[in-house]
Image (cartoon, grey):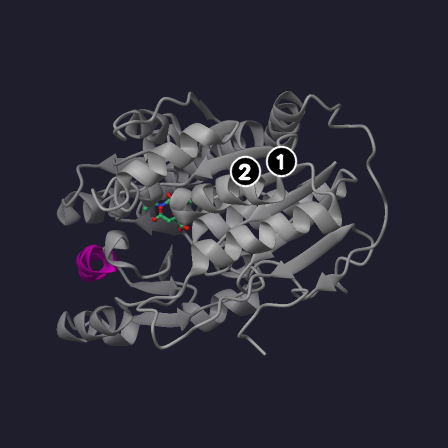
Amino acid sequence: MRIGIVCYPTHGGSGVAATELGLQLAHRDHSVHFIAYDRPFRLERLAVHRELDVHFHRVEVPTYPVLRSDPYALALANRVAELIQTQGLQVIHAHYAVPHATGLYLARELAGAAEVGLAVTLHGTDVTVVGSDPALARITAHSLNQVDAVVAVSDYLRRAAWRLPGLRQGVQVIPNFVDPAVFHPGGDPRVRSQLAAPEEKLLCHVSNFRPVKQVAQVIEAFAQVARETPARLALVGDGPERPAAEAQAEALGVGDRVSFLGFQRRVAPFLAVADLFVLSSSEESFGLAAAEAMACRVPVVAYRTGGVAELVEDRVSGFLVHPGDTQALAESALRILLDEDLRYSMALAGEKRVRTQFTPDRVIGRYEDLYGRITGLDPLDGRSGVPGQEIEPLSVPGSA
Ligand code: GMT
């Protein structure tokens, strides 16, 4: 099929999930067209994917002094409509509802292409925070009602979506997946030795350092752990809370034990050398970074919030504690770190869980079925093997 994938290109789980999905679809011989205002960060230059029918279409968003904010939703709708006509896209699948659901709905109207299937995957705050804000709730619900299929990445999120006023569309759960070719056990000892001495425990956290991730609480828990056993903390990622996190590590006297590794295009090498993954988000619809850690055979301690319990089995692949209880987080971390048998059995259980429940094979087929259902086409028909290319916009008035 010719599939358009609309996503945010930034370092967020929704963009990662969208990119991984698009690449897996391309590996199954679909023609995949990524549509975003910048290259999604997990999408390599297309030369790397030479053998795949993958394309990247940039959405140019004009600015003008009269406009208080960029007209991204309109530019997206305009671009998608153009691509429906020029590339013959059969399905457009957007990730993160705001404003992508609206962009898709408008694009189909604009292109006059009722036959094009539209799907939206909800990822979290697009429903629980931004989409349910009274300023956006009506347009979000209406747009989701207009598309052909709405997916949530966890049952928690599906239930949260029901609370969106005016939503009449059914929501189906298709979880995220982790590519075992990328995330697997067996870290490089040289990476490990740069982060911790042999006798030290290595804790790891990966996020975009937004307030919802509560990185301060990871550091607080780590400081308690470090008082009991020699340990280091590797923080991968960057975002608005990083300066506060750095200051806090200093204030708690663990500044020299915490490595701020910043944004990393490849996170697997860091996860694979960790002894424990720590997640203290106030809200998490799925917890993709935790799933990636589990695939690398690393146990998890996290707050029991949102969809995390659907991923991490408490007392099996890690420990889940009451949100906000940094002491319980630290105690759980120490229980795992000071008992190598427990640590190893939890690590194995987590790896097995991701390798059986959250695999590309289990997930991609479900999306293919969904695409078939909303278009009436056989999703395995008409697949092509044409190499992909980067296609800049035809023309965007005012952006020259
Ligand atoms: O909803 C968000 O805050 C944004 C989104 C993102 O782009 O990072 O994150 C969500 O999507 C991920 C992929 O499905 C999930 O793993 C994250 O749990 C989820 N984040 C939240 O729910 C806070």
Tag 1 secondary structure: helix
- Out of 182 and 146, give the one closest to the viewer: 146
User: Is the CB–ligand 1 distance for label 1 below 8 Å?
Assistant: no
**As shown in the figure, which amino acid type bears the numbered disc 1?**
Pro
Q: Which mark is residue 360?
A: 1
Q: Earlier in the sequence, mark 2 or mark 1?
A: 2
The quadrant where residue 189 appears: bottom right
Q: Is residue 222 magenta?
A: yes
The CA span between labels 2 and 1 is: 6 Å
The quadrant where residue 4 appears: top right
* Residue 235 relative to residue 175: left or right: left
Contact (CB < 8 A) between labels 2 and 1?
yes
Q: Is residue 124 above or below residue 206?
A: above
Read off the magenta span.
Answer: 215-228
Packing grade of label 1 (10 A; few <14, some 14-19, many >=20) is many
Q: Is residue 102 above or below residue 206?
A: above
Tag 2 secondary structure: loop
Would residue 184 be visible to someone looking at this image? no
